[in-house]
Image: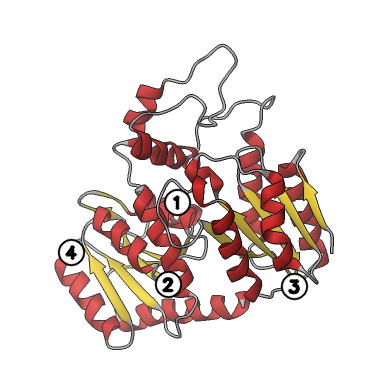
Amino acid sequence: MLIDVIEQDSESALLQMIERNHKQGSLASLVHFKFTLFGAQPNHDQFVLAVKECLIGFKASVYFCADGDVFVVWRGTARNVLKQLLQNVKAAFAQDMTIACDVFPHHYYDLLAHGEELRIICKQKLHAQPGLAPLPPSDADLDAAAIRIARTGHSRPDSGFPQAEGHATDWHSLGQRIEPRLRFSPEQIVTLAQAVEIRKQRKHPEILVVEDQTFSRLLLHSSLREHYTTHSTEQAKEAIQLYAEHAPDIVFLDIELPDGNGHQLAELFKRFDPQTFVVMVTAYNQQDEVMRARNNGARAFVIKPYNKQKIFDCIQLFHRNRRKAS
């Protein structure tokens, strides 16, 4: 069994493969191994040796990105391959895992269901390549920098941010940009990766309610907890912790929060968990709020006051979307 190994212009090759697969409608699986969380560049030969025995009988490809991340693609949807891949990669690269975690940080994708999300990831990586017009640091870049700062106590100029020629990155300003924003800590990122794996075994969805109005929060929580495991909070920062711990299937998310903005939370959850199902909640039916919610990955939009019909319509929409993706 031969594995196609792509080491040059892998971001472009991966994007082309995703586009081709979309047109053909072929069943295929992809795992994104996130070495960038550790600031690591894996040895290519070592990685191929670690995964080859897991892919016997499959047509498979490995894409090594310039930033260190690795994508493994194989034809078919055999999820039992994933467990062995994760075990082998963790065993081979344990020395690179500078954050303690039980499962190597990764994300699993079905190419048919998640093609658009993968296109966005590839395009972000393409824009980070040398020789292209520099872009300002993306939120993904800022999160990677936050992890490095948390781990090392300082930012390094080898962190992978694109720089305009002749202009050094202002790392002090970058640190200031990171500090006030709502984000997952490095520890929460690892916790979330583990929670997402546990979520795959659930038979019924878990729900997170983020609402600062006490009466509305209690009403929504009490309506849901009769049927579903439900967590609730009025604080954006606590919502981040609850999301990391539980990887909820559905989030009812108020826009106005005392310590943050619901739009920013929705974008954060979507970036780290593309399967998130966010229902934005507001007292105002304003078109710009609806459009911003959709742009940040919200799947539904509810205008207060709540009623049971609105709530359970959103849950039914979640179930319909999940059936389509399965």
The residue lying furthest to the bottom in this view is 226
First of labels 1, 2 by sequence position: 2
Q: Is any atom of residue 305 visible in this view?
A: no
Disc 3, SS: loop
What residue sits right under mark 2 in the picture?
249
Tags 3 and 1 in contact by the CB under 8 Å rule?
no
Placement of 43 over or under 113, stated as above or below: above
The span from disc 3 to disc 2 (Cα, nearest Å) is 25 Å
Residue 57 relative to residue 177: left or right: right
The span from disc 4 to disc 2 (Cα, nearest Å) is 22 Å
Disc 1, SS: helix
Image coordinates of residue 93 in percent, x first then y, are 56, 51
What residue sits right under mark 3 in the picture?
76
The span from disc 1 to disc 4 (Cα, nearest Å) is 22 Å
Comparing labels 4 and 3, the label whose residue is closer to the camera: 3
Tell me which amino acid carries mark 3: Gly
First of labels 4, 3 by sequence position: 3
First of labels 3, 2 by sequence position: 3
First of labels 1, 4 by sequence position: 4
Tags 4 and 2 in contact by the CB under 8 Å rule?
no
Tell me which amino acid carries mark 2: Asp
What residue sits right under mark 1 in the picture?
292
Tell me which amino acid carries mark 4: Gln
What residue sits right under mark 4 in the picture?
213
The span from disc 4 to disc 3 (Cα, nearest Å) is 47 Å
| Between 9 and 179, the one nearer to me in the picture | 9
Q: Residues within 10 Å of mark 4 (few under 14, many from 20)?
A: few
First of labels 4, 2 by sequence position: 4
First of labels 3, 1 by sequence position: 3
Q: Residues within 10 Å of mark 1 (few under 14, many from 20)?
A: few
Q: Residue at x 45, y 85 (%)?
A: 203
